[in-house]
Structure formats: structure tokens, C-alpha cells
Image (spheres, rainbow, N blue to C red):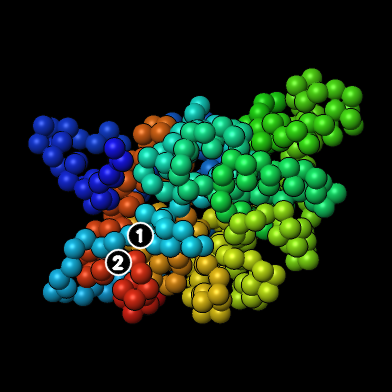
Amino acid sequence: MSFIRPPPYAYETQVYIQGLDDKRPSLPVDPREWEALAKERLSADSFGYVWGSAGTRETDENNRKAFRRWGIVPSRLVKSDFPSLRTKLFGEEYDYPVGIAPVGVQRIFHRDGEVAVASAAQTEGLPYILSSASSTSIEDVAEVNGNAHRWFQLYWPSNEHNDITKSLLNRAKAAKFSVLVVTLDTYILGWRPSDLSNGYNPFLRKDNIGVEIGFTDPVFRKKFAEKHGKEVEDDISLATAEWTHTIFPGTSHGWEDLQFLRQHWNGPIVLKGIQTVEDARQALDCGMQGIVVSNHGGRQQDGGVGSLDMLPEIVDAVGSELEVIFDSGVRCGADVAKALALGAKMVLLGRPYVYGLSIAGESGVRHVLKSILGDLQLTLHLSGIRSVHPEHLNRAVLRRTG
């Protein structure tokens, strides 16, 4: 018998029914409380890593301000059922227009790390994007994620390591990851004062956190053994440093290098980190199928514009020819609604689900996902918006407020 998932708004009903027996939610429902509670649970190193942003946090603050410049205008006496959240990307049907953004080193937040998040994504029906800075292998994540939608995010090795890149793509394809997400803005870690003040870089520790995909890659292991005359396990510190330098080489690829990815990936390719119309058009010219309008949640570059501020003009330029996805600064269902109204086809969650993971593992992630989806569906329903499709959810339902 197939599992029928209750509609997102039903989570509210469930909470109120439990309240009749004096049972309150074990986790906060207000998204503004998740960060503070995660801070209580995590070490200073781990919290500083997820909370931290580049420089003075101006880009991060601009991400949040950009959402506040838009308000949703409701329509009344609209006879309709609860709005459909189903959407289509790359020819595939998705239950919700919300996905799990790629976040690395998840085991620094909870011992179950990526396994917990991939399992929660499968249970709640959201696509999971695995970071190539994972602390769990590609294959182990695929196993726990079952038959769900899953995408693979690539921190792109330099051209001298094209054999490693090819190996990663082959492993992801074999594990039924359907979409390749190539992060463009993190070929070296940004200036992050929270991590610097703690002297903390999780990728350089003597463990497999953040480097497990490399440690389980046959091509990387072979090259390491040939170069150093020993196995990865014989010198974890050296292997960690070498893999980290492989996926964060310090310099960027060029547009012409995308041809290599097209040759070795037979599914959609999405470029993450696009912030300008010019780059969006270049992605289209290079044969990409999608982009993520994103500034990495403000983690890479200080003094940047809010990512949502750039979304409308990018959608206007390429939205009819590329799938435009959005992340950066998303905290609640209304944020998701605004990004969709401005033209995004899907919105990715980052810090909120990591806070849920930090607080209560898989159940914490599920709580965050249920809360944001329930908030989204009720926000649309109470605004007289029938679905997330563009004919119902578009800029006509928004007004500038600042």
C-alpha cells in the first residue's frame, strides 16, 4: 500500500489536537526561535560555522531586508480548496516547490548528519541536495533517501583533477542522483570572522567530516596512494588537506569548462551562485538547464546585494528558457511564497533545517520542514492564492513596502 502524506496545513491541526491532552510541541514552531535553541545545543565551533557569514554580515542582513521590502496582498471571497503546492522542474513532478539546500559537514551539527536529513527529506517529500563536502558517502545517502528526488552538488575540482570530477559524477549517476548542481562561488572559503575567531575549519580536522566523499572515491584514493606511497587511512591529516584543496582549489573555472560537465553528465545541470543577468544569460548560452539565484546565504562575500533583489530581473531575462531556483535568506513560509511570486520555480532551505538537525536530529529536521510547508500552504490559502503555479502566484499578489 502506498503511503499518502497528509497535506502540510494538517500539521497545524495535529498540534492543536495534541494540545487538547495538554501536549505541546517539543520544538518551537516560531522559526525565529530555532537559531537561539541551536546555539544552546551546539559547540561554539559548530554554531559559528552554520551561523557565520562573510565579513560584517552585511550580505546576510541584506538578504533578510530584501524579503521585508515585499508584502503579500490577499484577495477575498475566493472559493477554492487548499492550494496545490505541486510543481514541475526539468520535466519531473515535485510535491512541493521547496528543496533541501546543500550544506556540508552535517555531522558537526548532529551525529546522524546527512543520513538524518536525507531520511527526513524522503519522508516529507522534498528533494535532497547532497553537498560534495559531505561527511557521508554518496552511496550511503542514496540508500537512506530511497526512491526520493535527490540532486548532487559539486564543489568543482580544477581541470588537472578532471578524472576525480568524472568519478564523482559517475558515482552520483549510479546512485540515481538526477540533477547536478554546480556551486560557482566557493572555490575558496570566504572571510568568515566567526570561524576565524574560533580558529575552526571543519575540513582540516583529522576525521572524515566534510571529506568522506573524497575518502570513498576510488580515483582520489588511487592518486593519493601513488603520490604518497600510503593509503588515506595511514595519514588522515594529509589526506584531509589534499581532498580539501582538491574541491576548494583557490581559483575559479571558466565558462568554457562547462563543456566537460556536459560531456559527463546526462541529466540537467544547474549553476548555483548566479547574481547577475549577464551570468544567467551566459549559463543559458552554455547549455545549462537551470540556475540558482543565490549568494550562498551571505557566507562567501561581504557587502553584497540581497539575493531576492536580483531575482526579478534574472527571471525576466531567462525565466522562460531556464529553470530559476532561489536560495539565500529564506526563513519561513511567507518567504517561500514571495520568492515564488517573483518567479522562482523552487526555493531552497538552508540554515533553518540545519538548526532543526542541531536541536533534535531527524525529528528536528522533519519539524522544520513541516512547519515551513504548513506555513506556506496556509499563507497562500488565506491570501486567496489557488496554487503555486504562475497563473495564481505571481508579482500581482505582491506590493513593494520599502
Q: Which of 74 and 80 is in front in this view?
A: 80
- Pointer 1 residue: 86
The answer for how far apart the CA atoms under marks 2 and 1 are is 8 Å
> Which residue: 23% across, 73% down?
74
- State if disc 1 and disc 2 touch (CB < 8 Å): yes
Q: Position of residue 362 (x, y in %)?
A: 41, 33
Is 312 located above or below residue 82 in the figure?
below
Q: Position of residue 236 (x, y in %)?
A: 75, 25
Is 163 located above or below residue 391 in the figure?
above
Q: Where is residue 66 in the image (x, y as percent from the top left)?
A: 45, 67
Mark 2, secondary structure of its residue: loop
Residue 239 visible in the picture: yes
> Which residue: 65% across, 56% down?
266
Q: Earlier in the sequence, mark 2 or mark 1?
A: 1
- Residue type for callout 2: Ser
- Residue type for callout 1: Arg
Q: Nearer the viewer, residue 5 or 107?
A: 5
Q: Which of 295 and 161 is in front in this view?
A: 161
- Pointer 2 residue: 387
Q: Which residue lies furthest to the top in this view?
A: 234
Mark 1, secondary structure of its residue: loop
48 left or right of 122?
right
How packed mark 1 is, by other alpha carbons closer than 10 Å (few <14, some 14-19, many 20 or more), is some
Of the numbered discs in the image, which one, if any, rests on residue 132?
Answer: none
Q: Position of residue 106 (x, y in %)?
A: 54, 36
Q: Give the quadrant of residue 364.
A: top left
> Which residue: 81% across, 23% down?
231
